[in-house]
Image (cartoon, rainbow, N blue to C red):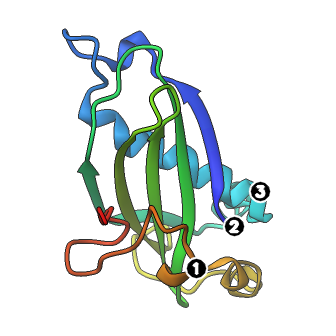
Amino acid sequence: MISKTEFRVRYSETDGQRRAHHSHFPVWFEMGRADFCRSSGFNYREMEDNGLFLVVARLSCRYAAPLEYDDLVCVETWLSSISRKIMTFDYLVRNLSTGQIAGSGSTTLVCVDPKGDPRSFPEGVLELLSPKVLKSEDLPTNSRADSSVGRAQLLHS
């Protein structure tokens, strides 16, 4: 499953040259991840209410082309792996205004308790999300995972 989150680059997200500042990509990844979870039926808020949290243990981002103020952007998000305590999401950021791929990235999240100790996901989470995992070979040809550089890094063919 690939979730698609569309939005426009806001002026407050740009630098002095009207280009989107690189620091916003992780925020956009989070937007995509939240949309993916919602559309998958995974209720993160309920998990937090029960005392378990997802913390980002690793984040990677590759910038491929600039985004500018008011560009229409789509963050494509998919779950690339899940285990008892860890899940990894990959992202592809597209500029829908120009058709260019603006970047790609990956986040690895760990399930922890309020003290920060790793814990297993609540019952039912693996069963719900495991069927939604997309492997590299299942992705469209213009986005592939490259583990030697970091997951979800775009390969130019």
Categorize mark 3 by other alpha carbons within 10 Å: few (<14), some (14-19), many (20+): few
**Who is closer to the viewer here, 52 or 110?**
110
Residue 88 vertical placement versus 2 (above, below): below
| Element type at mark 2 | loop
Earlier in the chain: of badge 1 and badge 3, it is 3
Q: Amino acid at mark 3?
A: Ser
Q: CA distance from mark 1 to mark 3?
A: 19 Å
Earlier in the chain: of badge 2 and badge 3, it is 3
Residue 110 falls left or right of residue 13: right
Q: Which mark is residue 39?
A: 3
> Which residue carries the number 1 mark?
138
Earlier in the chain: of badge 2 and badge 1, it is 2
Check contact, mark 2 vs mark 1: CB within 8 A: no
The mark lying in front, picked from 1 and 3, is 1
Q: Amino acid at mark 2?
A: Asn
> Which residue carries the number 2 mark?
50
Q: CA distance from mark 2 to mark 3?
A: 21 Å
| Element type at mark 3 | helix
Q: CA distance from mark 2 to mark 1?
A: 34 Å
Residue 124 vertical placement versus 31 (above, below): below
Residue at image location 31% in from the left, 66% down from the top? 157
